[in-house]
Amino acid sequence: MNKLELGKRLFFEQEQISTGGESIENRDPFQRDRDRILHSRAFRRLMHKTQIFNANKGDHFRNRLTHTLEVSQIARSIGKVLGLDDELLEAISYGHDLGHTPFGHIGEKTLNKILKGEYIDRLSSENQRLFPQSGDNFKHNFQSLRVVDSLECRSEAYMGLNLTFAVREGILKHTNKLMNIKYSDLNLEHMQIANEFSCTLEGQVVAISDEIAQCTHDLEDGVRSGIISIADVEKNDLVKKIIDNYKLKELNYNSKTPSLDIRINRIKFLVGYLINDVCIQSQTEIKKKLGDNNDFKAIYVTEKLVDFKSETKELVRKLNEFITNSVIFSEDISIADAKSENIIIQLFSAYYQTPRQLPDYILNRYFLKNGLDFNRLALKEDELKCDIRFVRLICDYLAGMTDQFASREYMRLYYPEYI
């Protein structure tokens, strides 16, 4: 597959913007893809989806949208050094987390368990009998592809955003958890799931930029929250290396603004160090495998060429282990996750057991997929409940919710109106 083929759309559409009969469309395919993602509803909803800490914790913690923008910035910084396509980098960055659920990763885990039937005991005995056993999964990178392929809509002629293969593949492969994932009705043609790395350098850059953004901003937010201290952070080997490499001053552990101290004196240097490390290592690998060709934009590659140095990779792994142990598995986050898990299970149970509680536009998706006209009177609940497509439909709806909307919907469905 060459550069030209990567730029072709799986569903071709000739853009026409009418001005006296003449077209003024002058964007290339990757620009169009980026703009379509940027103007999508799913992109706007990222603002109100949890990264780690929810909005009630404070105004300065990352949410899913600010994380996405940080990934884009890091990816473009690396891409500029490697001579890659800016628009392709942005499009993949903006789209990579569109499939994330409310309440962070616990939402993803909960929906996956729902599809696997692990919460079937929460349903009535009759509904337990009807629940379809399909072996389907829920994974946010697959769901992001599902969002841009079929859940978002910009034309009456087709579902989805009609994105190029390069952007779609980069979105799917921004995380390497691909094998043994089952997703009904998802077009994975030519995706080469066995290769966990993207087939473009841009896709590989976004994947590692996501990792850099996560480990650095999670560390900063952990200090801001008070869950971990600056003293804890400075015991980490990678942070020690940053302090030594840049000859950074010792911090005042009793500072009234520890999060500001760590941002100015540690995190910004950590981000810069990791970006520089990736650029040096990747330039070496690209030159070794692809030669001195000056145009690496949107080319097809068959090997993973964008990475950390081996020593840095191990240091990043240990840093992520520290963050997971100290922040992700902390008491505060565990309490929030347990509440969030319960909200999602209860919402699913309500919609599954009484499908007419779903809004018209959600139910209409099911009718459209089955070639039927939408009619609440003709809705046969027992038939719906036996169909994995209906279960997936509910999961799609839940995954698209923001934290606030999911919480309000839980109250609407379960709280009495007069209290």
Image (tube, grey):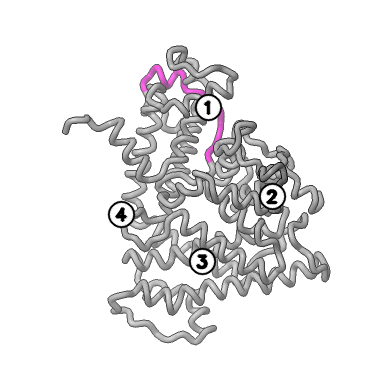
Q: Which mark is residue 25?
A: 2
Say which amino acid is labelled 2: Glu
What separation in Å lies between label 3 and label 4 (alpha carbons)?
Answer: 30 Å
What separation in Å lies between label 3 and label 1 (alpha carbons)?
Answer: 45 Å
Q: Is residue 235 visible?
A: yes
Q: Verify whether residue 218 appears in magenta.
A: no
The earlier-in-sequence mark between 3 and 2 is: 2
Residue that appears at 75% across and 45% down? 8
Residue highlighted by disc 3: 318
Residue highlighted by disc 1: 365
The earlier-in-sequence mark between 2 and 1 is: 2
What separation in Å lies between label 4 and label 1 (alpha carbons)?
Answer: 33 Å
Say which amino acid is labelled 4: Asn
Element marked by disc 1: helix
Residue highlighted by disc 4: 56
Left or right, 339 with reference to 114: left
What separation in Å lies between label 2 and label 4 (alpha carbons)?
Answer: 43 Å
Residue that appears at 70% across and 69% down? 82
Instruction: State which region is magenta.
Output: 124-138
Residue that appears at 32% across and 36% down? 410
